[in-house]
């Protein structure tokens, strides 16, 4: 019998090859199974995002996709509302008034010390709690908002709120938009004139005079507006948070007005930034791991060094720029103001309308 | 007939789903009560006219007037600037020149919005030519006149290429021999242009104007960045309510008013121009 030589694949070859291929992909499958999960996080732009990415570089349990707030953190609320119960984000960087609104909406996942042990080193007064008294925010930064000016371009040396009306300051003030900074800028004017969160009328009255004076050169809506305005010399005075002033201080002499004696309006209006985890997140464990990492003493210190704010973890050290809002117990009473954000959050809509109808026409 | 309906059905479905229903939802939201501290109207919020009543404040009238006025001014300036460009392209005897200029206009339209707006901001700001310009105009960099001028410059950056491309077809369709005939009968070049070419390009002018005007009155990024927070269009008011305080009902009310005013104004302008064209 003539032996027929087979050419091409045989059933045995195909089956052998398939089994070999399956074995070869098993390690890949194992790797795929243990691949890091993905987190979607949103935070502020400007100096914040660079510092956040820098501080997050050592976190390997999840890949993080970053998004930026379109101006103030409040702009994320509409995005979440529109997409709820399936918003895009797991983690949101926010601050006091935004925590309150998110609590009202019932969006926040509780955080426990067992799941996020590094939160034990954060002072209790910085936590927000839901109706079951569970912690819902992870503070990572203590900061303040205050008046500051560029010494090389400001026509006068400022030590009093009343000086903002000086005719020499024509067009020199970069005023923050009504819903940036939760209207703390108007609160500073109110406090300077005997008011507070429950009585903002002295602040509005002063702002009207300021608007009529022609000294407001720009109404800024975000850090970028402020940075562009002050670094180009368009304006030289502003009331804002620490981060852009720290950025500007690298190239310009910025006079920070937080230790001005006998001027109640020129205090540091204190607040804190932090992460919140949305209840809708599908990666809660990874998100909690990330929060625990971010609030770790060395990471928290590194992050706050980069943005010039004070660390929330008591085991971290505050760096040079953050000392502007680091006060001794005696100094706290004179130079720091702790706003009632619950009251301010309720005033935001009315403040916006009043600013647009009563102040902006005068600024023109 | 049945075939036509079948062909139109998908488009109508898309328009209904993505245009009509959202607008109806917007109208409904505009009549809802807003509770501060929450996002949007609460479920089963009561109906109210408060959101519209708030817009009766004279300040809001000013924002609408400014939006329509700056839009009108910019659109007219865009036509004045774009017509010579379109005319040059249409009448150029060199094919390469025609293609190159058209490509330049198309490329300008596709340039990134933020890049262009920030380019204008820097060019006309203190770091650019702003100081020299305000010295010539005898004004200040932070004055409202210069701010409005900057906003107009930003809008023109977008509208001139659009207007030029819209006018191109209209001018190309005019037989150049009509102008030659007018000149042969004794009209000079200016009179033949004004009495022959310009009226014949009226449909193109109307289309270009509508495109530019619609763009200008709905502009958001340009007034937001170049307006320095002091020149605000209706779109910026809408954004601040939706995006910054979560007052959807208030933002919806402004949106509805803007929609009605825009449609009404565009209808009147179109009717006026059509009547004038008919009378020619």
Image (tube, coloured by chain):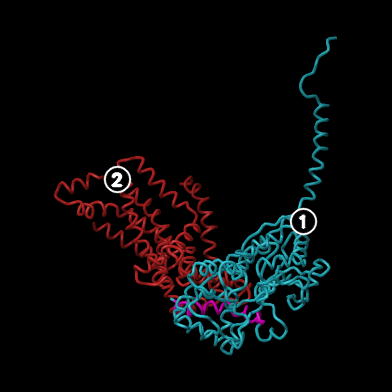
Chain that is cyan in the image: A
At 82% from the left and 41% from the top, the residue drawn is: A26
Number of the label disc, if any, that sits on residue A206: none
Return the x and y of residue A225 as percentages of the image width and height: 53, 67
Q: Quadrant of the C terminus of chain A?
A: bottom left
Residue pointed to by mark 1: A61
Question: Does B195 lie within the magenta span?
Answer: no
* Residue B63 sits in quarter: bottom left
Disc 2, SS? helix
In this rendered view, identify the residue nearer to me: B278 or B37: B37
Return the x and y of residue A227 as percentages of the image width and height: 55, 67
Q: Chain of mark 1?
A: A
Mark 1, Cα crowd under 10 Å, few <14 / some 14-19 / many 20+, is: some
In this rendered view, identify the residue nearer to me: A112 or A189: A189
Mark 2, Cα crowd under 10 Å, few <14 / some 14-19 / many 20+, is: few
Residue pointed to by mark 2: B91
Q: Colour of chain B?
A: red
User: Residue lying farthest top?
Assistant: A1
Regarding residue A101, the answer to whether it shows in the image is yes
Query: Left of B210 or right of it: where is A230?
Result: right
């Amino acid at each position: 019998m003539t032996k027929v030589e087979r050419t091409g694949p045989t059933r045995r070859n195909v089956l052998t090859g398939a089994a070999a291929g399956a074995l070869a992909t098993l390690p890949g499958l194992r790797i795929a199974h243990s691949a890091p999960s993905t987190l979607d996080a949103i935070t502020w732009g400007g100096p914040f995002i660079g510092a956040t990415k820098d501080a997050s570089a050592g976190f390997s349990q999840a890949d993080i996709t970053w998004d930026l707030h379109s101006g103030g953190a409040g702009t994320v609320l509409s995005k979440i509302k529109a997409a709820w119960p399936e918003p895009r984000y797991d983690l949101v960087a926010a601050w006091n008034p935004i925590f309150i609104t998110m609590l009202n909406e019932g969006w926040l996942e509780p955080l426990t010390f067992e799941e996020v042990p590094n939160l034990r080193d954060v002072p209790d007064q910085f936590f927000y709690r839901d109706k079951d008294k569970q912690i819902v925010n992870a503070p990572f930064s203590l900061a303040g908002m205050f008046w500051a000016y560029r010494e090389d371009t400001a026509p006068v040396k400022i030590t009093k709120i009343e000086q903002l009306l000086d005719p020499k300051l024509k067009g020199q003030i970069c005023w923050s938009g009504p819903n940036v900074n939760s209207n703390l800028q108007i609160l500073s004017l109110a406090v300077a004139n005997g008011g507070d969160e429950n009585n903002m009328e002295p602040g509005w009255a002063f702002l009207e005079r300021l608007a009529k004076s022609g000294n407001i050169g720009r109404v800024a809506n975000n850090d970028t507006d402020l940075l562009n305005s002050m670094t180009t010399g368009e304006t030289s005075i502003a009331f804002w948070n620490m981060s852009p002033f720290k950025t500007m201080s690298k190239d310009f002499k910025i006079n920070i007005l937080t230790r001005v004696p006998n001027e109640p309006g020129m205090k540091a209006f204190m607040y804190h930034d932090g992460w919140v985890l949305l209840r809708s997140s599908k990666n809660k464990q990874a998100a909690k791991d990330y929060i625990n990492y971010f609030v770790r003493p060395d990471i928290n210190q590194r992050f706050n060094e980069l943005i010039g704010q004070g660390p929330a973890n008591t085991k971290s050290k505050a760096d040079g720029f953050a000392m502007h809002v680091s006060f001794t117990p005696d100094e706290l009473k004179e130079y720091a103001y702790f706003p009632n954000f619950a009251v301010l959050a309720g005033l935001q809509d009315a403040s916006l309308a009043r600013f647009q109808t009563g102040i902006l026409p005068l600024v023109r | 007939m049945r075939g036509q309906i079948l062909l139109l059905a998908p488009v109508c479905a898309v328009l209904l789903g993505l245009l009509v229903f959202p607008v109806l939802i917007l109208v409904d939201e505009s009549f809802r009560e807003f509770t501060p501290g929450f996002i949007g109207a609460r479920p089963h919020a009561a109906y109210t006219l408060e959101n519209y009543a708030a817009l009766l404040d004279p300040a809001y009238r000013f924002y609408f007037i400014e939006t329509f006025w700056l839009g009108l001014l910019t659109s007219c300036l865009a036509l004045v600037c774009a017509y010579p460009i379109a005319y040059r392209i249409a009448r150029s005897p060199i094919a390469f020149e025609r293609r190159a200029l058209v490509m330049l206009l198309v490329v300008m339209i596709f340039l990134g919005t933020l890049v262009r707006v920030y380019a204008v901001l820097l060019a006309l700001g203190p770091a650019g030519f702003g100081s020299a310009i305000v010295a010539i105009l005898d004004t200040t960099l932070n004055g409202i006149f210069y701010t409005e001028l900057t906003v107009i410059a930003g809008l023109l950056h977008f509208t001139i290429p659009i207007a030029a491309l819209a006018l191109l077809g209209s001018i190309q369709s005019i037989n150049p021999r009509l102008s030659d005939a007018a000149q042969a009968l004794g009209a000079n070049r200016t009179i033949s242009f004004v009495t022959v070419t310009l009226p014949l390009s009226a449909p193109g002018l109307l289309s270009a104007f509508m495109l530019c005007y619609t763009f200008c009155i709905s502009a958001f990024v340009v007034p937001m960045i170049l307006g320095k927070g002091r020149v605000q269009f209706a779109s910026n008011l809408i954004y601040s309510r939706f995006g910054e305080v979560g007052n959807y009902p208030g933002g919806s009310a402004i949106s509805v008013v803007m929609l009605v005013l825009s449609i009404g104004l565009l209808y009147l302008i179109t009717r006026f121009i059509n009547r004038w064209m008919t009378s020619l």
